[in-house]
Image (tube, helix red, strand yellow):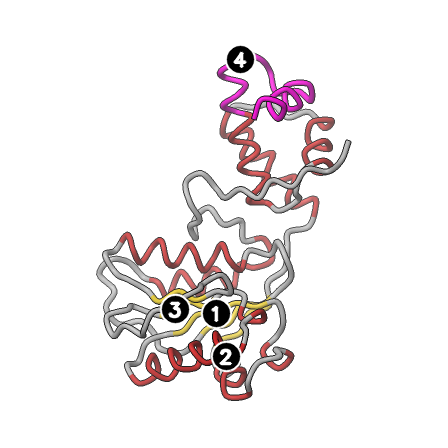
Amino acid sequence: MQQLVLDMGLPTGPSLKNFCAGPNEAAVAHLTLWLGDATSTLRSPVPTYLWGGNGCGKTHLLQALRAALQQQGESVGWLDPNVQAPPEFDENWACVLMDDVHAFNTELQHVAFNWFVHAQTLQLAVLAAGSLPPADLKLRDDLRTRLGWGHVFALQALSEPERRAVLRQAADTRGIFLTNEVMDFMLTRFSRDLGSLMELLDLMDGYALQTQRAVTIPLIKTMMDNT
């Protein structure tokens, strides 16, 4: 069977609490401290940069910050390679978030630098993520140096034993019994990104309840055929 790639987000949305930190506890602790709570009015303006390969959780963490700030009634500036018409910098933003900066074209680099300068002037933080460490980014020098002068965290993807442990714990919480065969099937036939695997687990749980069947490989195949 050809591997299926399920590019699905967590059903409850990304948050710092539902991020499985694994080897990235220092980064999560830093972001949690920076975020504070609804009463926080003074956040450190020192920039933060997260870097690492696919599946390490960079986008999840930035989206989690955006969601948390919006829940606190604040707005943020968001920039990624898919933004077609970036807005003007807004002085009311709580911070600036930039994702996949390694893929910024010339126009987005200009916008990013402009936002960075305005944010620094207003003592607002810029939190960014990319696939490479700051020194290796193929970006304009003034932007690259600004991305690297604050807090820098190298994120690592969870190992397979860690992913299995997280899935097992999540399944136990839902009252689902995952056999080793089902676990192997999930990890070899679907996207190995933890967010997608957790979404798959939720789909399996709902489908099993709907059909009154145990979670098995045939159930997963039937579910995918009906999706």
State the residue at coordinates (37%, 58%). Answer: 66
Which residue is disc 1 drawn over?
128
Amino acid, disc 4: Thr
Region of the chain picked out in magenta, as a range? 205-227
Q: Residue furthest bottom?
A: 142
Quick one: SS at disc 1? strand
State the residue at coordinates (56%, 32%). Answer: 201
| Rendering coords of residue 187 (x, y %) | 70, 38
Which is nearer the N-term, disc 4 or disc 2? 2
In the rendered image, the quadrant that contains the N terminus is: top right
Instruction: From this view, report whether residue 4 is shown above or below residue 145.
Output: above
Instruction: From this view, report whether residue 14 is shown above or below residue 40.
Output: above
Which residue is disc 4 drawn over?
211
Quick one: SS at disc 2? helix
Which residue is disc 3 drawn over?
86
Q: Is residue 216 magenta?
A: yes
